[in-house]
Amino acid sequence: MNLRRTVSKTCAATLLVVLSIATPWISANSHTDSFSFALIGDQPYNNFFEPATSQLIQQIGRERHVSWILHIGDIKGGNEPCSDDLLERRLDQLQQSEKPLVYVPGDNEWTDCHRSSNGNFDTQERLEFLRKQAFSKPRTLGKQGFPIRQQIKHPYPEHLMWTQGSTLFLSLNIPGSNNDLLNPKSRNASTKKVKQLFEARSLAIESWLAEAEQLFDKADPRLTETVIAIQGNPIDGSGGAGSNPVKNGYARFMKSLVKYINTTKRPVLLAHGDTHRFKWDKPSLKRFGGTPETDALFYRVEGWGHPFMNAWVQVTVTPGTKMPFEASSISLPAPEVSN
């Protein structure tokens, strides 16, 4: 008997039970039952645009076919203060959603808070504040939130895991600004400290992906695909076009993603923000070690961000099919004009 494999199977089965118990709102539908969620993010960027974000969330709340909302991060502008009051107000805005809302931390609300225009905050202190405000309980935001599983072990409570039908969802703290690899003078941190923080978070991310991999073990083929949500754009964003992990803060994660796809041999959708333009494509993962087989299973979607706040992205999943993901841009209805 291969004891390591037996233990791994047992851990995977246990985790599946935990996920099933933690998400009673999700029905165990057949693999072909489609569902949709809404993708928004990178907004609002100032007080003037707060009503526009509220209107967007309210409109999505009236869409019967949308199960929940994914806000991909950046709930404030890059030049706004990272004050307690502002962050609390923007998070409260998300809490007003009539539908469950999953929030992913963005660079503007922690990574970039060292900037003088942001208040010269300590970035790790701001991340801890976000954790207390948005991730203190294993539950999403919104008036009708649903239970989720958090990565408490490391601890990185902003790393979430949940299922809908046979689809596995993960959210990871991988923000813009080159995944927090930048170290300008305003950060007041040594290069050694920046690398230590990056290494600790990278190890937590890899551990979370490894736990997810176990769920796709051949002993229990219940899950059929994965959706991974991050804020930063690791493909054509602030990391550049290279794959050197010393310069590209996303390279290590992307290589782990390639491993994840090759291990699970199931489709993966990467949902991200940061560059504010709708993208729906299948970019190649060759520079991160991917093969044609890897590329065939990989999908990427990005939602609209500031100042494009009159549209959102509908992501539809048809579990267990060869091409399980579909994404489309939805514009808000034009306001009625009275005669």
Image (tube, rainbow, N blue to C red):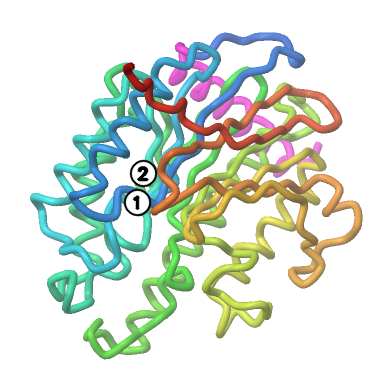
Q: CA distance from mark 2 to mark 1?
A: 4 Å
Whether residue 50 is visible to the viewer of this picture, yes or no, is: yes
Residue type at numbered disc 1: Pro
Viewer-proximal residue, 196 or 65?
65
Answer whether residue 252 is magenta in the image: no
Q: Main secondary structure of the magenta part?
A: helix
SS type, badge 1:
loop
Q: Residue at x 39, y 19 (%)?
A: 61
Say which residue label 2 marks.
Answer: 152
Tell me, for residue 48, which label it has, or none: none
Whether residue 204 is visible to the viewer of this picture, yes or no, is: no
Q: Which stretch appears magenta?
A: 1-25
Residue type at numbered disc 2: Ile
Position of residue 211 in the picture relative to residue 138 (left or right): right
Tell me, for residue 155, which label it has, or none: 1
Q: Residue at x 32, y 87 (%)?
A: 184
Position of residue 227 in the picture relative to residue 238 (left or right): right
Position of residue 35 in the picture relative to residue 219 (left or right): left
Give above or below for 117 relative to 19: below
Q: Position of residue 8 (x, y in %)?
A: 66, 38
Viewer-proximal residue, 210 or 106?
106
